[in-house]
Image: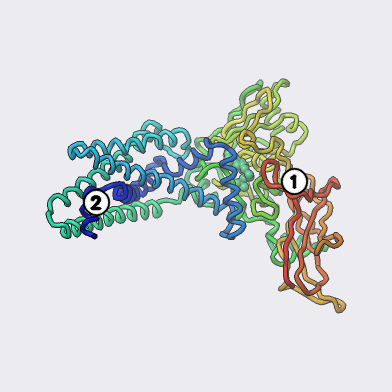
Amino acid sequence: MSQQVVKRNKRPGFWMGAWIGLLAISPILALFFLADVVFGLPLVPLDVIDWAARNLPGNLITAGIDAIVATNDTLNLGRTDVVAKTIEQMIGIAAVVIAAVLMGGLLYVTLTRTNNRARNLPYGAFAGALLGLPLALMSGATNFTATTPPALNFVYIVLMFVAWGAAVAWIYNDLTTLHSKSGDVSAAQLNRRQFLVRVGGVAATLTVVGGGLSVLLGGRETTPTSSTTTTATNPTPPPAPTNTPNPNSAAARVERSAFIDDLVPAQGTRPEYTPVDQHYRIDISARPPVIKEADWVLPITGMVGNPLSLTLEDLRTKYEPREQIITLSCISNPVGGDLISTTRWTGVSLQALLEEAQISPSARALHIKGADGFDEYLDLALVKRDERIMLTYAWDGQPLAIEHGFPLRIWIPDVYGMKQPKWIISIEAVDAVGEGYWVRRGWSFEARVNTTSVIDTISVDEVYERDGQTFVPLGGIAYAGARGIARVEVRMDDGEWVEAQLKTPLSDTSWVVWRYDWPFEAGPHAFEVRAIDGTGVPQSETRRDVRPDGATGIHRRGARL
Ligand SMILES: Nc1nc2c(c(=O)[nH]1)N[C@H]1C(S)=C(S)[C@@H](COP(=O)(O)O)O[C@H]1N2
Ligand SMILES: [Mo]
């Protein structure tokens, strides 16, 4: 039986081709990673996913993102943004691997049919080119991380896959030689197994060595702090430390409580001031654009009398700096989600710059572009009304981290992050408000933040007794953009809404921490929270999904007490 099978499968077919295609693509991928780190060549698997994110239909992408967010909500894999980026990168790698597996299989089927040994290597090279060409085109259309010339990148990618195809065909030839050399089946089987083990060994070694080296040498883009951007490459020192202390610091807390008898948050309430390395991160690329300060200027052009070209140093020194503690939220944040954070932003008012640029009275909007191909429009009427709108160059007193938009991003009060480009490379005054990156993909045009409130904790470890009554502290945050929070209310088991206590907010554009000490009753309970914004409008209690206008609804948390 087994001998018959071996005889029938004498020539390697689809599955063998798929397997060899897989073995051969691993070291190629490792080489791509290595060449990215060492030479700044494009990293094809990540370009593929970036290309897909930009070119596949918006609702398909959104559905994908929603699925990731929902999966993470259920499985609790970790921070949504970090998990999503990891999954994204894995999909990119998987796409290239699957393509290579299929192409390897098809190649072996073809070689078996054509049965012309002399042509096998050219066929393999051709199959590799077939695979490499679309990938090189996708990379060329999307890549912004490579520091090498586009023509070179194109040739490099195609040649890498040609090499892959030739290797797969070469192994085919060797496999079939092993067969024909030995008349006796069991010897052939053994040889073939040994050969495959050897091929696998070589592939694994190359992959591990290449991958290992790129990890050792790498890390330039993924460093979560801004230190890499400030040390060697950037001549300008970080902005002078301001006298605003970190609001979470003991000193700041003592200072505050000396003036006001401020609220102590319930244990398990999120930090009121988010450490920058824990600030959520959402953008359209597998890796952020890496911009060197020395290579960067901000052009302000279009319908202006005096076009400007500003360096980061200009922005830091020529204009009055503004500072504001700001809560930023992603429109994809579900009620109770983690795509919302708070830090201190420093920058310059856009009004000052536009005055200097002598913006034309007939200009209606600014078209703002990011280095990653992202863009948005900002209505000039809004800029004229609101001097707080600012071009931001520092977070928490440090230059922006690479992930968070170094060297420059914008802040617009009261709208979701999707309206606020990071890695700004140009601002153009135009005659109409257009639709930005996510608006063109079906998301809200206004993207005004919805009032939201969240129960972070039912702090059972903190129960205490007063006057014979046991209390359990509940706590969390409430946020209504620049409208502020007037009141937060809590209820249990669909009972009466009762008012929670509010901590003095860090600013009028930050979330507010609330606390409610619940008079304990044993049993299973459901708690709910709602917020009333600074204009007196209560948050919407209608459960609505994130798309297209941001989530609304009441956050609810059950507990068996
Ligand atoms: N250039 C650029 N800017 C961007 C984005 C992007 O993908 N590219 N994403 C936007 C979205 S959807 C959000 S929620 C915020 C997130 O900012 P953060 O990652 O610094 O928290 O950046 C916004 N600005
Ligand atoms: Mo977002």
Residue ID at (36%, 53%): 213
- Residues 531 and 288: in front is 531
10 Å neighbourhood of mark 1: few (<14), some, or many (≥20)?
Answer: many
Label 2: which secondary element: loop
CA distance for labels 2 and 1: 63 Å
Q: How is the image coloured?
A: rainbow
Three-letter code, disc 2? Asn
Q: Is residue 445 above or below residue 228?
A: above
For label 2, count other residues whose C-alpha is less than 10 Å away and answer few (under 14), some (14-19) or many (20+): few
**Residue that protrudes farthest toward the bottom in the picture:** 468
Q: Position of residue 313 (x, y in %)?
A: 58, 38
Q: Looking at the picture, tell me which residue is in the foreground, 501 or 178.
A: 178
Judge from the rendering whether residue 122 lies leftward or rightward of residue 289; answer left or right.
Answer: left
Q: Quadrant of residue 438?
A: top right
Could one spot residue 399 in this view of the protein?
Answer: no
The amino acid type of the residue labelled 1 equals Asn
Q: In this rendered view, identify the residue nearer to me: 107 or 257.
A: 107
Q: Where is residue 538? Give x, y as percent.
A: 83, 49
Residue at x 18%, y 40% (from the top left corner)? 117
Disc assigned to residue 450: 1
Numbered badge on residue 125: none
Answer with the quarter of the image where residue 153 lies.
top left
- Residue 445 figure quarter: top right
- Element under label 1? loop
Along the horizontal axis of the image, is 173 left or right of 538? left
Q: Is residue 504 above or below residue 60?
A: below
Q: Position of residue 184 (x, y in %)?
A: 13, 57
Q: Quadrant of the C terminus?
A: bottom right
Q: Is residue 6 visible?
A: yes
Question: Which residue corresponds to mark 2?
Answer: 9
In front: mark 2 or mark 1? 2
The image shows residue 416 at horizontal and vertical percentages of 68, 43
